[in-house]
Amino acid sequence: MAELRITIGGRDFDVACQEGEEQYLKAAAAMLDNEAQALSVQLGRIPEARMLLMAGLMLADKAAGAEDNVRVLSARVEELERQLAVARSNPVKIEVPVVPPAVTETLAEIAARAEALADRVEEAVSA
C-alpha cells in the first residue's frame, strides 16, 4: 500500500491507497480541496468534519449533475445511432443526370461550324 499526505481545506491528512492509484487519489483530493477552499472563503474556519461533509456534498451534487448529463447524452447518442441504422438500411438513391448523346453530338457540330466560320473570317481579313 502506498501512503500519501494530502491537504484538504488547509488541513493535512495521511491516507493509503493501492500501488499505482496515487495519481487518482491526488486528483480526488485536489477536487475535494477545491470545494473545501470555496467553503473556507465563504464561511471562514469551520470544524473539520463539517468542512469535509459539506465539501463532499458539493462534489456529490456536481457528480449527480454530471450523471444526469451523461444519461441525457447517452439517450441522444442512442437516438442518433438508431437514426443512422435506419438511414443505412434505407439508402437514398441519388440520380446523376447524364447528357444524352444527341446533345453532345449537336454541341460538337455547332463547335465545328463555329471553327469553320472563324477560319473564313480570318481568310477574309487576310485577303
Image (cartoon, rainbow, N blue to C red):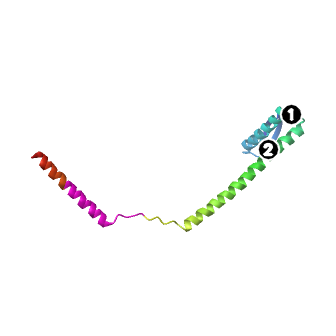
Instruction: Confirm whether residue 14 shows in the render.
Output: yes
Q: In this view, does 102 lie above or below 24?
A: below
Residue 103 lies in the magenta-colored region? yes
Considering the numbered disc 1 on the image, is that residue within a helix, a strand or a loop?
helix
Residue 118 is left or right of residue 12, and the answer is: left
Q: What residue type is labelled 2?
A: Leu
**Magenta part of the chain:** 96-115
Nearer to us in this view, 43 or 24: 43
Furthest residue to the left? Answer: 127
Q: Position of residue 105 (x, y in %)?
A: 27, 64
Q: Name the residue under label 1.
A: 43
Direction from residue 14 to residue 107 in the image, left or right: left
Q: Residues within 10 Å of mark 2 (few under 14, many from 20)?
A: some
Q: Please give the label number shown on residue 59.
A: 2
Of the pair 60 and 99, the residue shown nearer to us: 99
Disc 1 residue type (three-letter): Leu
Residue 110 has which mark?
A: none
